[in-house]
């Protein structure tokens, strides 16, 4: 059997986290030659993951611009990713998730009639403005891809309902569970990797920690202000501490800085690298987030997660009872958090570990399928 060249394309923090287990597995497999191309749609947050995962990209397009627009970013991605594809002539182009990088990577491959494999396929909220623009990005990739690695039966069913060829749809689990298990083992072997939170943990000793993240574009212009106000009211409780690694998007930063700077029970910090975020997930009593990935990680750790969105393309956490959609209404967020803090029965009902998103073997299944052309 001849070695297959697999071009793996990614560019943001969550893609890097969910793709590094696939890259590691491809590197270890003698049937495949992996070529990595990062768009660097994110810079600092991408580099944090590359470093911990030990990945040195073969191509680094370094495309991030401050406060980049969707159209400018997408145009640059399409042009530059296409050039890499022309140079590499891969047997497969692999993209992950729903970002601009993933969508443009799939489209550039399609323009060259290269087969595309999609990691984390079939997630659907059925609302093209929530999440925006990710729902449409996923649908575009779903139309182009030949192999669809669906994390769960729910996501596989969504693809089949869109008449995607069933022969290309495989339930593999989500590689985020592989990544979380990998980083947890790494921290266990080298605890120093996650000791950077010690100062904050000491400062908030005796308090009940709530971990917060927020970055969604559909929440710009109203939603983020509500989230900031909710955090301010939650942190007014003396028994509570909020640890909030703030996304570097300037549209997020300015809102959070204006509302939360200087509050004694809030630590607004730089984005954490993955080992430190895993540590935050383990010390937090509750996660409050609009992130996709955190909705998947929290159930695996049995951490109640309140999701500040109107819809979710990841209903499995809600069905399992560990995640709850709370939207972006200030009173609703505050009262849901207070209920979890004050009502032990409600908390215990949510704080049970489930793994609806996978068993940590997803990358192995994906590589097997790629090596055998599905
Ligand atoms: C992107 C993805 C989103 C994903 C999110 C994960 C798209 C359209 N959006 O959104 O699906 O959920 O990443 O975080 O693909 N910035 C930095 N340093 C970084 C990263 C970002 O300074 O390491 C700042 C830059 O000013 C950049 C801005 O954040 O222009 C926005 O980055 P961008 O990738 O366009 O959008 P996100 O909101 O991060
Ligand atoms: N994450 C991280 N550091 C942080 C915040 C999040 O490593 O400070 C990780 C988190 O564990 C998850 C991923 O980043 O795996 C989620 O990324 P993000 O919320 O930016 O994007 P989304 O998942 O919403 O696309």
Image: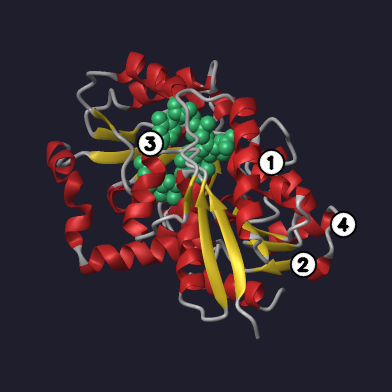
Are there few (<14), some (14-19), or many (20+) residues within 10 Å of tag 1? many
Give the number of the mark in front: 1 or 4: 1
The local secondary structure at tag 4 comes to: loop
**Considering only order in the chain, which callout, 3 or 2, is on the residue closer to the N terminus?**
2
The local secondary structure at tag 1 comes to: helix
**Considering only order in the chain, which callout, 4 or 2, is on the residue closer to the N terminus?**
4
Question: How far across and down, in percent of the image, does residue 244 sit?
Answer: 33, 34
Question: How far across and down, in percent of the image, does residue 124 sit?
Answer: 70, 46
Distance of mark 2 from mark 4, alpha carbons?
Answer: 11 Å
Q: Check if mark 1's residue and mark 2's residue have beta carbons within 8 Å.
A: no
What residue did someone put label 4 on?
Answer: 163
What residue did someone put label 1 on?
Answer: 137
What residue did someone put label 2 on?
Answer: 168
Q: Check if mark 4's residue and mark 3's residue have beta carbons within 8 Å.
A: no
Question: How far across and down, in percent of the image, does residue 227 sit?
Answer: 45, 24
Instruction: Pick out the residue farthest to the front.
Output: 87
Distance of mark 2 from mark 3, alpha carbons?
Answer: 37 Å
* Of the pair 347 and 7, the residue shown nearer to us: 7
- In the image, the residue with mark 1 has its CB under 8 Å from the nearest atom of ligand 1: yes
Are there few (<14), some (14-19), or many (20+) residues within 10 Å of tag 3? many
């Amino acid at each position: 059997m001849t070695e297959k060249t697999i071009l793996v394309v990614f560019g943001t923090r969550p893609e890097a986290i969910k793709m590094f287990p696939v890259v590691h597995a491809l590197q270890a497999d003698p049937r495949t030659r992996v070529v990595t191309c990062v768009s660097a749609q994110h810079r600092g947050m991408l580099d944090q993951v590359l470093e911990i995962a030990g990945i040195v990209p073969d191509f680094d397009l370094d495309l991030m611009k401050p406060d980049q627009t969707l159209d400018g970013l997408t145009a640059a991605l399409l042009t530059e990713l296409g050039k890499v594809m022309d140079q590499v002539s891969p047997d497969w182009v692999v993209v992950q998730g729903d970002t601009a990088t993933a969508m443009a990577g799939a489209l550039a491959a399609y323009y060259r009639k290269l087969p595309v494999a999609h990691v984390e396929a079939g997630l659907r909220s059925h609302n093209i403005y929530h999440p925006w623009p990710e729902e449409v990005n996923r649908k575009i990739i779903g139309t182009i891809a030949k192999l669809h690695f669906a994390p769960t039966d729910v996501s596989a069913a969504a693809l089949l309902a869109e008449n995607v060829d069933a022969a290309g749809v495989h339930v593999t689990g989500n590689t985020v569970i592989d990544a979380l298990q990998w980083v947890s083992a790494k921290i266990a072997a080298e605890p120093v990797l996650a000791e950077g939170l010690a100062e904050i943990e000491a400062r908030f000793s005796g308090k009940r920690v709530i971990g917060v993240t927020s970055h969604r574009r559909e929440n710009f212009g109203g939603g983020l202000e509500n989230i900031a106000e909710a955090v301010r009211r939650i942190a007014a409780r003396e028994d509570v501490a909020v640890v909030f690694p703030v996304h570097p998007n300037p549209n997020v930063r300015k809102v959070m800085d204006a509302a939360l700077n200087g509050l004694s029970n809030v630590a607004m910090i730089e984005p954490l690298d993955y080992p430190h975020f895993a540590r935050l997930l383990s010390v937090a009593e509750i996660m409050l987030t609009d992130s996709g990935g955190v909705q998947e990680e929290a159930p695996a750790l049995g951490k109640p997660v309140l999701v500040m969105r109107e819809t979710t393309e990841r209903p499995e956490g809600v069905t399992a009872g560990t995640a709850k959609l709370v939207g972006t209404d200030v009173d609703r967020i505050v009262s849901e958090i207070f209920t979890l803090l004050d009502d032990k029965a409600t908390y215990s009902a949510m704080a049970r570990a489930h793994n609806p998103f996978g068993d940590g073997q997803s990358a192995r299944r994906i590589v097997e399928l790629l090596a055998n052309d599905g």
